[in-house]
Amino acid sequence: MKKFEELTEREVLALAIGLEEEDERVYADFAEGLRQDFPATASMFEGMREEESGHRRRLLELYRRKFGEHIPLIRRQDVRGFVERPALWLVRPLRIDAVRKEASAMEVETRRFYEKVAARTQDASIRQLLDDLATEERDHENRAQELDKQKLPDSVKADEEAAQRRLFVLQIVQPGLAGLMDGSVSTLAPVFAAALATQKSWDAFLVGLAASAGAGISMGFAEALSDDGSLTGRGHPWVRGFICGAMTAIGGIGHTLPFLIKDFRLALWAAAAVVVAELGVITWIRRRYMDTPWVTAALQVGLGGVLVFITGVLIGSS
């Protein structure tokens, strides 16, 4: 790895060409990843890609005049001082705010690079181009915000924010909520049946732990195999499966943990209190993200919970 101060003018131009090419490809990937759900922002990044392509052409023309056709391979990772970039362009779905922040950080880094190399180069034509590019990159630092104002009017931004919320609900909230409801409700019967039948906290804990783990695995696979998300927009199936399975297990373990308390009656009352809290959380999520009225959400969740709880009590007391 070379130090920045050791780079020759030829290597500086070669590195600058590589940086502009990398930025161009990153913006192209951003545009492609956002095109389906956020077309206006995709257009913004397409415009930034074209600008980086123009910078690269100007650098190439100057390099050919000065040093010929062969460009040595020198990359950002070959020079000390460059910050490692997270490969956001490989992530699907792309998070629109994270992408805009990364674009701003990229412009800042490139601008500082041009300013630093321009200050130490001796060739007048190279210094002039690097100074010009530094000025343009300085103007681009807030390009995402400027293009928001230029190409993304309030109505479009509102549409994109609504689309982002829909994707969040489809890909995260829905599978998580389904898992939490199943884990919190379906495991009530075996846990409380075992508790009342044995009158032993440890036995109830083991049953609850087994029921939670089994339900989590079952729900995780069921969600992952339900559809591949290509038509529904629900995201990667295994990500949804993991979310659903994990929330199912958490929902069941929540009212299982109180049975670690040795005093059986205290454990039973603590578990009942946790159940009420779990049903309250589920009701809030349904109201917050599914736009279900409070009363309707509470009745739907509460009725299911009460029926399963009574089933467990009756079986455990028989």
Image: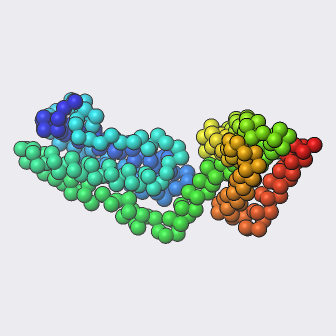
Quadrant holding the C terminus: top right
Which x, y percent locates residue 128? 13, 51
Quadrant holding the N terminus: top left
Which residue lies at the image location 44% right of the left edge and 48% below the top edge? 30
* Residue 244 visible in this rendered orientation of the protein: no
Look at the picture and state if 291 lies above or below 225: below
Q: Nearer the viewer, residue 89 or 126?
A: 89
Which x, y percent locates residue 299? 80, 63
Q: Nearer the viewer, residue 245 or 120?
A: 245
Q: Quadrant of residue 190?
A: top right
Which x, y percent locates residue 6? 13, 34
Which residue lies at the image location 33% right of the left edge and 60% below the top edge? 142
Which residue lies at the image location 51% right of the left edge and 56% below the top edge? 39
Look at the picture and state if 90 lies above or below 272: above
Q: Nearer the viewer, residue 110 or 297?
A: 297
Which x, y percent locates residue 79? 22, 35
Say whether residue 310 is left or right of residue 62.
right
